[in-house]
Structures are given as C-alpha cells and as structure tokens.
Image (cartoon, coloured by chain):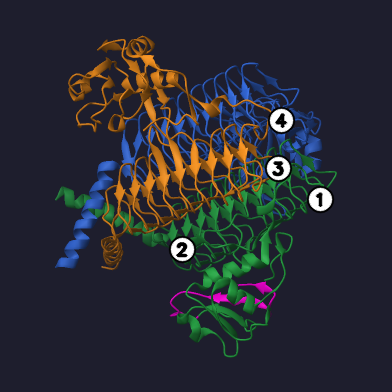
Chain colours: A blue, B orange, C green
Amino acid sequence: MTVDPRFYAPLGALTLGQIAELTDATLDGDGAIPVFGIASAANAQEGDLVFLDGDGKATPSISPTARLFVTNEANLRHVPEGASKLVTRFPRFAHATAALAMFRTRHLDWASDERISSDANVHDGARISPGAVIGPGATIGEGTWIGPNASVGPGVQIGRNCQIGANVSIFCALLGDHVTLLSGARIGETGFGVMAAPDGQRDAPHFGRVILQDHVSIGANTCVDRGVFEDTILGERTKIDNLSQIAHNVVFGRSVVMAAFGGISGSVRVGDNAMLGGRVGIADHVRIGEGVSLAASSGVFRDIDGGETWGGTPAKPLRQWMREIAWLQKQANQKKNS
Amino acid sequence: MTVDPRFYAPLGALTLGQIAELTDATLDGDGAIPVFGIASAANAQEGDLVFLDGDGKATPSISPTARLFVTNEANLRHVPEGASKLVTRFPRFAHATAALAMFRTRHLDWASDERISSDANVHDGARISPGAVIGPGATIGEGTWIGPNASVGPGVQIGRNCQIGANVSIFCALLGDHVTLLSGARIGETGFGVMAAPDGQRDAPHFGRVILQDHVSIGANTCVDRGVFEDTILGERTKIDNLSQIAHNVVFGRSVVMAAFGGISGSVRVGDNAMLGGRVGIADHVRIGEGVSLAASSGVFRDIDGGETWGGTPAKPLRQWMREIAWLQKQANQKKNS
Amino acid sequence: MTVDPRFYAPLGALTLGQIAELTDATLDGDGAIPVFGIASAANAQEGDLVFLDGDGKATPSISPTARLFVTNEANLRHVPEGASKLVTRFPRFAHATAALAMFRTRHLDWASDERISSDANVHDGARISPGAVIGPGATIGEGTWIGPNASVGPGVQIGRNCQIGANVSIFCALLGDHVTLLSGARIGETGFGVMAAPDGQRDAPHFGRVILQDHVSIGANTCVDRGVFEDTILGERTKIDNLSQIAHNVVFGRSVVMAAFGGISGSVRVGDNAMLGGRVGIADHVRIGEGVSLAASSGVFRDIDGGETWGGTPAKPLRQWMREIAWLQKQANQKKNS
C-alpha cells in the first residue's frame, strides 16, 4: 500500500539513522538506508518502514519485501534475517513518529477563507448548496449535489450523480458514481487506535483511505473510518442505515445491507449480499461469508460461513439461539409454578 | 396523502401510457388516463398511482379510491376489479421511476451562494447565528434561534420560540412552536428502504414529511427520517434523547420520553406517555400502547398493550424477564457447586 | 459551583419575594433576601437558590451552606431549620424559571453575520478552515486546527495543538491542550432532563460546563453533554470512540478507553484506566472503579469495584456471565436431544 499523496503530503525520505535519532531507538543496521514509506508489516513494499509490537507470542504476518523494522525486544525473533531494525520499548509510537515526519495529513493544515477552493475541480453540472466547503485538489463530478454546510476535504474524489447530504464531512476518500451520503455522515475520520507512548496512551495516526464504490448508500450520522495503512472499502450497492459505525480497514462486499446502529470493528470482512439487522455488532478481524443473515442485536465474535443465519450475543446459529430462549422461558416459568 | 409541493416540485401529470413506456411495464387499461399523484396503496386518493410488490401471499391494505396500479404477476389477484394496471417484474422500482418523473425533491437541486435565501421568510425577531443556511420558501418564526452552521432546507416551516442547534439539518419538515433540536440532529432524511431494480438493489425514494408538534425536543445527533408517502409524526412534548433513530412513517403520541440510542423501525406506533429506556429497539409495524414502560436495552418484536412494563430481547413482561434472569443465574451456579 | 459567566450572562440578583411572584410559589421567609446564584442542593454556596423535588422519601444530600430552598410539601421535612423556603407543586420548574430569569445562556442569543467574532481570541498560529464559526469571547490556542464548518460557541476555551474536526459543535466547554475532537462531535449540549411543569413536561435547563483535559480524544458524532449545575469532566488522555453518549455530570478519570456506542448515563463516575468495550451502557449514578474492564454490550446497573472484569445485561462478573451462557447452551440442547 502506497500512502496516497492526495491526502498525505510527502515530506521526503528519512534515513534509518535519522529515524533512530528522532525516536530514541537503537539502530541495528545501516543508518544510511533511506526509508521512503510506511506500511503495516503484512503489506510492506520495498523501502517501507514497518513495526512489530505486543508480546511477540503470535507470529505476525510479514510481507517478504519488508526489510525495515521498528520492533521491541519481544518481537526481535520475528524480524527476518538480514533486515534492518530499530529497537525500542514503544515500536508503534516510534513508527508513528517517523510516519508523521514523513507525511503530513493535508486536511489538518487546511486554513483558508476560500469556501470552494480555486484548486478544486468542480464540474459545471454539479450543484453546490450554500455553506458547502470544498478543499484544494478535490474533484466533484457531473450531476452531483453537495448539500449545505457539507465539508469536502482536500484531494477527495467524488464521482458523478452523487448526493452528498447537509453537514456531511469527507476526508481521505474516493467515491464512485451514484453514491449517496445522507446528512451528517462522517467519511474518512481516523479509526480508534490507542498506542503506548512514553508519556501515556496516544491516538495512532492513520494513513489509509475510504473507498465507496458505485451506488453505495450511507445513512445519516453514520461513520466510516479510514484505514490505518490500507483502505476501508464498501463494495458496489452496499447500503448502510443511519447511526452506524464502520471501523478502519473493514471491507464489505457488494450489495450488503446493514440496518441502523450497526457496529463493525476493525479489519472485519463481510461478504456480498449479507444482511445485517439493526444493532448488530461484529468484533475485530471476524469474517462473515456471502449471504449471511444476522438477526437484530447480534453480537458476533467468530467467523460465520456463507449462507448461514445467526443471532444472539455471543451470536450462534439462529435456531440454536431461539431454542435456548424458548427453553429458558419454559423452565424459568415451570420453576415458578411448581 | 398529497405530496407537499413545498418540498417536492410537481413536474406535471403523466398518462398511464407514458409511464408504461418510461418503465417498460405492460399496460392493462386505458393509456390516456392521467396520473396526478403517487401514494401507498393504503392511502391513495383518486388519480394516484400505487404499487403492489412482494410475493402476494398477504392481502395488502388498499384504499377504495385506488384505481391505478403498478403490480407484479404475484399481486395481480389483489388488484381491484376494473382498476388499471401496469405489470412489471419490478413494481416498486417502476413506481419510483414514475414518481421521480412527476416530482422533483427541491433540496436535491439546491445550488446557490445565498446563505439566507431572499425567498425565505425569516421573522425579525428570530436570531440567526453565523454560518446558518436557510433555503427558499422556508419560514422561521418569532423568537426562534437558528444555531451556527445549521442547514434549513427549502420550504421547511419552523414555528416560534424554537431552538435549532448548531450543524443541525432539516428537510421536508414542519415544526411547531417551542421545538428544540439539539446540535447535529438530522430531521427529514430519506428512510432506509431498499427496492429491487433491474440492475440490482436501489434506495427507495421518499415523498413524505416530518411533523414535530409543539414542545417536541430532539437530542444531539438524533435522526428522524421522513415518511415514504405519509408523514413521520412526533406528538406534543415528546422528548427524544441523543443518538436515537426514528424511521420513516413512525407516529409517536404526546409526552413520550425516549432515552439515548433508541431505535424505532418503520411504521411503528407509540402511544401517549410511553417511557422508553436507553438502547430500546422496536421492530417495524409494532404498536406500543399508551403509558407503556420499556426497560433499557429492550428489543421489542410484538405489540404491547397500554400500561404494561416490558424488558429483555426479545422483550416480554418485565417480571417474567427478571424471573428468567434470576432462575438462570441460580441454576447455572448450582450446577457449578454440585 | 458558580455559574460560569463566560457561558451564562448574569442578569442580576433577584429577591426571594420576586421569585415567589415569578413562580407563583408560597414564600416562607424574608422576601427581601437576595438570591445571587443557583445550584444543586448538594453543592450550594451562600446566596444560591436550590430545589428539592420528588416524593421526599429519600434523604437528599444538602450542602451546609444551602439556605434558600424551593420545595414541594413532600420535601418540607428535609429543609434545614431556619432556611427560607418557596413552596410549590413544581419546585424543579420554579427553580428553572428563577434560573432563566437570572442567567441567559449566551449561545442561544448568538445572532451575527460575523463568521469569526472580532471578540474572539484566535492565536496567529492556529489554522482555521473555511466555514468554521467562532463566537465572541472564545479562545483558540497556538497550533490548534479548527475544521471546516465547525461551530465554536461564545466563551469556549480551546488550548494548544488541538484538532477540532469538521462540523463539530462546542458550547459551554473548556478544552486543554492536545485535545482531539473528530468530525461531528457534539460537546456541551444540554443533558436529558425532564421536569414537570403546570402545562406538562419540559426540558430542564442546564447551567454547567464540559471540561476536557489534556490529550482527551473524542470520536466522530459522539456527544458529551454539559452538567446541570456542575461539570461533565473527562480526565487526561481519556479516549472515546465514535457515536458514544456521555450524559450530564459524568466524571471520567484518566486514560479511560471507551469503544463505539458507549452510553453513560447522568452522574456516573468511571475510574482511571477503565476499559469499556463497544456498546457498553451504564445506568445513572453508578460508580465504576479504577482499571475495571467491561465486555462489549455490558449493561451495568450497579457499582463495580476497581480491577474487576464484568459482562452481560444486567452485568455481572465475567466468569459468572460466561458460566451462565455455557450452562444455558448445554441444557437447552440436551433438552432437545433427550
């Protein structure tokens, strides 16, 4: 994954030695090696700095092209032979420190009186309501409506015939055609990530994007966070109701339907045509197969194969859940009568 | 129900024949018959086009004045004798296509640099904060405050002594006097409706309104969707907490109180003085009687008579729910000790 | 607690006699006594008017310096000897009526075309995005970014190096340094309080503030309500995810982490380093100790000692909850097989 320069301005490469100095880490390797990018260990390309953090017990997924590591002692054994290492007690934080020195999030510097940037590319056939704000480098396609007081961040790409509601905000995102965002939707905020720093916990910075494919529809006040290093992606015709939360790095397939108050944790995968009832929650990294149905209020903590129908918290096959509910009701009331 | 021209600009009547051509439907009737309006089958007036969709097993509610139908084969038997029919595999979609050709949602064309429209009717005794946007045809009453960056759509009527918070959006809505909307409330978005179209699922368009009666109070970031063809209505002095969701066509009586994260599905009815605890969910079309109390986190799937107190998911009378909880706790721990 | 004049403009003292007349209450005391402020009974200072409402069965917490009471008959026995009393059927409402005659909430009168008030104090090193609105008396510190279409109310104090997202609103609040508010966060709205008035239920007015200490981080579309008379406080480095609700008078310690859809009712206390999973709810006045962990979807109705891990609704120690789930699953399925 390459950091997208439309959203994150590259400030230039650093050497491993410079990063060691910046982060107080111990260098084990050639300090002159240049670092060109940042990535997760799993998806690193050549020249990317990655990190390994935690207790080191689980074997991390590491891209074969990852050669530049920030790690703690516990993860040293996972660093591939011959790779360069920066060793520190706070690898996630050191990596973030380097990342923030290499890439500047464009919208966090946005300061202007210019409501519609003269560096934006707004099609003549787009309709812009009063109070809407469009940042430099943004593109708005033909036939698209931007609602009042909506905020379209620097570099955001919006296709044709989209409806962007009132008071919506969009950052670090690419939208296809016929995308609908109802009012107050929040697209592209940083996800919820906490990292340990020498002075206490801090927010982990995010360098990914949100991709909303054609005909995606997002409810009012719903949030779709951008990825940490990769993208959060909603497939074609996927439809999300109001007041839902989709965390960083989530990938939904096509024509998924999710009712209100859905809560999808980081890195979840949901297959095509899945149907998620109201108030469904899914724990991080869980995979939901194609065509799965989840009853309202399900709390899902494990993978579900395609085509199944589950319910309850913790979720289980619907019939089993209903059997337990019925059995409990019967037993508890027998008890009373006897 | 007549489509309100303050929110939906009439584009002129079509004939049945024109609609057949527009939607690729098969006409069974006189192609010269004019269609003046659109409606649900249950509430159609003369000249309104209605649709019947689904598998046709249940008998739909049909107004005696409904004479113009879009239907699929499965529902042909429900069309009253002598009525005109357009037959298609996608009746909901064909009806929507006709509706969008007959009525244009005004705010989706709103394009202007004029922050407060010169065609709005703002009382001299109203207070308008910076950044607030008011559309053409909107009315703001005496003593009302419009917060910063609020968005008041075309034709919206707001009474006297209302408080409209910061970054609120309001479309297709009529507000009485002394109505309070806390910041970020979303009034009048389209509801969550999916319809089958030849190229896959699409959002169903909405042509109804939101009615908030006197002294209604809506929490921060709460959403009240407008009706599909009818209205979503909250009665006098009803009070909704933050981050709640009220779907299309819902009707609440007077002095209902609903705590945070309440989720009310489409077409639910809630009687006067009902008390809904935090995180209550109610499935669509359910009817809740007057003065009902629902414990926090209740998930309600069936009608509840007036005056009762329920809890749990699926919800049941509170005593029964508590009995089951107590019984389970006792049994499960005996099991361990024995 | 003194009402903060940066947010509530003092309109001058009233005498007890004037308040009696204003509220139709019966005066038992010297009508010439001046009332300088308003407070809760528990935290009143000299000269503050307080109220006692409800059925009077529980003994209220009353500050020894409270000498001016509005009360109903049922609470007369709790009024300290020698104190002055206004007696009425609607003490909460009468108190609110007096309060609103003594203090005017500044932002509810905000009417201006001036996007960034000339009476605001914006540091040269702050970055202000287009569409952002800043009220009179507000302060923005060095290095702080204010996102597009954000609304910063009159008198709001924002420290250095903060990030205030797009379309955020902030009223009646003091923010430290390095505070992050993601887009659509709602800081300082009135809390959810209903009071009985002669003509039916009404919203209780709020005169407190929100305090967000250094390094606090608030998710997108999350709401933090201001206190009724005291403050809602989030301690240093506390981190709240998207779409959460924190009610009036809540106090969180340091480095608390709360995942999405957290719902914290009024006056709850949460200790340092507590970890609250997604969709956790806590009933009002509950106290959660330091370092407590709450599983996702917990519904907490009682105090929890420091260091414990709880789950379920109603919440109980995690092991017990898991034992019950496992036992039910086993029994219900045995039943079926036998």
Mark 4 and mark 3: span between their CA atoms? 31 Å
**Location of residue A42 with respect to A202 vertically, above or below:** above
Name the secondary structure under disc 3. Answer: loop
Both marks 4 and 2 on one chain: no
Spot occupied by residue A70 in the image (x, y as percentages of width and height): 69, 39
Name the secondary structure under disc 1. Answer: loop
Residue A57 occupies which quadrant of the picture? top right
Name the secondary structure under disc 4. Answer: strand
Please tell me whether mark 1 or mark 2 is closer to you in this view: 2
Quarter in which the C terminus of chain B is drawn: bottom left
Q: Can residue C171 be seen in this view?
A: yes
Name the secondary structure under disc 2. Answer: loop
Q: Which chain carries label 3?
A: B
**Location of residue B177 with respect to A246 vertically, above or below:** below
Name the residue carrying label 4.
Answer: A8
Mark 1 and mark 2: span between their CA atoms? 40 Å
- Residue at image point 33% right, 14% down: B16
Name the residue carrying label 3.
Answer: B130
Mark 1 and mark 4: span between their CA atoms? 34 Å
